[in-house]
Amino acid sequence: MSGRVIVIGGGIGGLATAALLARGGAEVTLLERSDQVGGRAGTLTLDGFRFDTGPSFYFMPEVFDHFFALFGERTADHLDLVRLDPAYRLFPEDGAPVDLTADPWPVFESLEPGAGERVQAYAEEASEAYRTALDHFLYTTFARPDRAVSADVLRRSGTLARLLTQTLAERIEDVTEHPVIRQMLGYHAVFLGSSPYRVPALYSLMSHLDLVDGVLYPRGGMYTLIEAIERIARAQGVEIRAGVDVVGIEVDPAARDLRHPRRTGTARGVRLASGEVLAADVVVSAADLFHTETALLPEQHRTRPESWWQDKGPGISALLIMAGVRGPLPELAHHSLFFTRDWPGNFDAILGDDKRVPEPASLYVSRTTATDPGAAPEGHETLYVLVPFPADPSITDLDGYADRFLDQIGDWAGIEDLRSRIVTRHLVGPADFARDYSAWQGTALGMEHTLAQSAMFRPGNRSPKVPNLLYTGAGTVPGVGLPMCLISAELVAKRLLGETSPTPLPTPLRPGFLDAARPRGAWPWT
């Protein structure tokens, strides 16, 4: 007998969760509000130009490899990956551009004598921290935090304590005095929805990704990843219904007991905007966690009502500029980073108490046509610009901001008449994230990864009040980003199984694996 699962939201977390649970033997229906799956990791075709509308860095390849292996498949069966060299080009406000090449240590040495060796040592420590995170923390639900503590973790406890009590910026200051190198080692904090002055130094592990692993790109765009997971989900039997808006989670009252001391109810399905009610034995929400808790759940069943969120940080939002440009843009690499001289002031404008749009701004530009010419008509290029913005849906005049930032890119990169060469463009801002994804305060990524909002301190993936309601995606453990959302899908499967280990599930998963669920799991027939 199979259980019925409804997954709310077709972003990468929802798609991956649906695929895994269908593999496990569940009868899965995925409900997506928009007309296409992918969520923030979407795609847009405009006047012959193709854009990825969300994530554009392919980091942590072993996480993707493991996910495909869960289904007995290989990444290479679905994606055509190419390594980028340079990984990116950096344009400082002052000074010449810097390319991070496949052999990065001479690059640092050229900027500051002795920095090559120091940054290499820093990267080695980052690699060790990265491996520790993969082996002990990222694949755990924290239902049993003690199981993440091994002899290896205890051996590194002194180092881990230091990395948790320093900020990333403070850790980097111990390595180099050069402002550009500091930026090259700290920009990853933006991928965490935060700044190097707010995230713990433990996230120095992210330097392993570009300095050691290198940066990959799937030909055809990042959306080919979404298409691959959608194919797998459908092959496993997932029913995907697009253009369907979930407006409520239906919950029946249920008494507390020793196993569920905070329980107030049991989810029995979801209600659609059309009035239709769909029944389910398990509901998994891949929607924004704030929206799920404060809008979809009845008030008496909320673990995190609106008051809980008042002292929490939504992290950054963004202005996205998708532009089709006439003529070549050799001045830009596939990935280009533009960093202001006053970096602390730039982040304070976005995340401080007096939020405002910084000008000039540190920003990111993706020129996918550097690797993938088919993304634009012949003789043209695509530009995807991400400007970190305050999480504030009231920000208006996106066109005016876009003009200024495009001019900044042209000035800093030495591109003449950049704005006049744009033949089409599309803008997305905080209000769009709030409307299209019900994103908390219009955030672009999700709750930022400060120490108080990371690992075991991040919202868990199971509701204590409604135990058959689970969460997946960027708002829950382990966090934001495509790899983290894939892991979050696996953590839902672990919750249903009652699996509390800190290690990934074995590959491949056998069809029907949910019938092995333990009594402590959340699967209906345990």
Image (cartoon, rainbow, N blue to C red):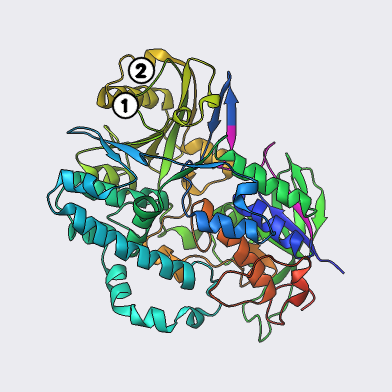
Q: Residue at x 70, y 66 (%)?
A: 509
Q: Is residue 68 above or below residue 368?
A: below
Occupied quadrant, residue 69: bottom right
Looking at the rendered structure, the secondary structure element under dot 2 is: loop
Residue 181: which numbered mark, if any?
Answer: none
Amino acid type, label 1: Ile
User: Picture coordinates of residue 246 (x, y %)?
Assistant: 71, 48
User: Picture coordinates of residue 94 (x, y %)?
Assistant: 17, 33
Q: Residue at x 82, y 48 (%)?
A: 276
Q: Is residue 139 left or right of residue 129?
A: right
Q: Is residue 211 left or right of residue 509?
A: left
Crowding near pointer 1: few (<14 within 10 Å), some, many (20+)?
many
Front residue of this view, candidates 391 and 336: 336
| Residue 40 magenta | yes
User: In the orientation shown, which residue stands out farthest toward the bottom?
Assistant: 258
Front residue of this view, candidates 240 and 297: 240
Q: Of label 1 and label 2, which has the lower sequence position?
A: 1
Residue 418: which numbered mark, if any?
Answer: 2
| Residue 350 magenta | no
Crowding near pointer 2: few (<14 within 10 Å), some, many (20+)?
some
Front residue of this view, candidates 456 and 298: 456
Q: CA distance from mark 1 to mark 2?
A: 8 Å
Q: Judge whether residue 95 can be spotted in this image.
A: yes
Q: Residue at x 26, y 42 (%)?
A: 346
- What residue sits right under mark 1 in the picture? 409
Is there CB contact under 8 Å for labels 1 and 2?
yes
Q: Is residue 115 above or below residue 471?
A: above
Q: Judge whether residue 11 can be spotted in this image.
A: no
Q: Which residues are magenta?
A: 27-43
Amino acid type, label 2: Leu
